[in-house]
């Protein structure tokens, strides 16, 4: 009995002698307007801005030019990046309260910016995104771009952010605005 006899479809066009078999994992393309693309691009932009003294506008333009998929969600990227940058001091103050054993400047750059984006999306943006979605996306970004245990750290910090955090954050933003 041949191994392929039980298949429900014909493999008439497949010739193992001539056709190449690849072990490459094929991932489905994300829809062009997917917020996941915007979060991924935003993380890359924030990472660059956090590790260099590059100009925000130049970094945004370069990322949009290099990645056509990012261009389609450019408004979301601009909103996330500018929101994180504008509120970085208040966000960092809040994060420090939830991870006191890790001074914010000692948290890995990737983790720090994932957390900043998630806090911005959860507490500051006008658009309501369920916290479960925000945490899930943040953990996925940490798995993709962070160190081995980044996803656990990100999940733990974000899991601690509750309605109490929202209240504290509003106070912190008021204090920053009054300075």
Image: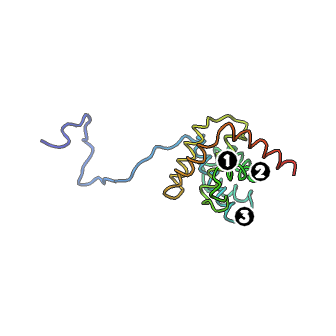
Of callouts 3 and 2, which one flags the residue occurring earlier in the amino acid sequence?
Answer: 3
Please rate how many residues cluster around mark 3, counting C-alpha atoms within 10 Å: few if below 14, some from 14 to 19, many from 20. few
User: Residues under labels 3 and 2: Cα distance?
Assistant: 16 Å
Image depth: mark 3 or mark 2 in front: 2
Please rate how many residues cluster around mark 1, counting C-alpha atoms within 10 Å: few if below 14, some from 14 to 19, many from 20. many
Q: Which residue is mark 3?
A: 54
Residue furthest right as drawn: 178
Residue 132 image position (x, y, % from top left):
57, 37
User: Residues under labels 3 and 1: Cα distance?
Assistant: 17 Å
- Examine the rendered structure and indicate whether residue 107 appears above or below residue 84: below
Secondary structure category for the residue under label 3: loop
Q: Quadrant of residue 170?
A: top right
Name the residue located 61 percent from the left edge and 43 percent from the top edge. Answer: 160
User: Residues under labels 1 and 2: Cα distance?
Assistant: 14 Å
Residue 59 image position (x, y, % from top left):
69, 59
Secondary structure category for the residue under label 1: helix
Name the residue located 20 percent from the left edge and 41 percent from the top edge. Answer: 4
Secondary structure category for the residue under label 2: helix
Residue 118 image position (x, y, % from top left):
64, 45
Q: Which residue is mark 1?
A: 77
Of callouts 3 and 1, which one flags the residue occurring earlier in the amino acid sequence?
Answer: 3
Left or right, residue 177 beside residue 87: right
- Examine the rendered structure and indicate whether residue 128 appears above or below residue 56: above
Please rate how many residues cluster around mark 2, counting C-alpha atoms within 10 Å: few if below 14, some from 14 to 19, many from 20. few
Query: Residue 115 — which label?
Result: none
Left or right, residue 151 beside residue 101: left
């Amino acid at each position: 009995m041949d191994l392929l006899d039980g298949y429900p479809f014909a493999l008439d066009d497949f010739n193992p002698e001539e056709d190449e078999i690849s072990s490459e994992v094929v991932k489905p393309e994300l829809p062009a307007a997917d917020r996941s693309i915007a979060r991924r691009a935003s993380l890359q932009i924030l990472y660059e801005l956090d590790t260099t003294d590059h100009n925000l506008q130049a970094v945004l333009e370069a990322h949009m030019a290099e990645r056509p998929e990012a261009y389609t969600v450019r408004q979301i990227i601009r909103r996330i990046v500018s929101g994180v940058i504008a509120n970085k001091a208040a966000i960092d103050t809040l994060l420090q309260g939830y991870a006191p054993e890790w001074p914010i400047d000692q948290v890995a750059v990737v983790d720090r910016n994932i957390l900043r984006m998630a806090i911005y999306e959860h507490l500051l943006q006008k658009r309501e995104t369920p916290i479960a979605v925000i945490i899930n996306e943040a953990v996925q970004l940490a798995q993709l771009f962070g160190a081995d245990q980044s996803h656990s750290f990100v999940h733990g910090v974000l899991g601690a952010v509750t309605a109490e955090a929202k209240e504290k954050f509003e106070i912190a933003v008021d204090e920053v605005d009054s300075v």
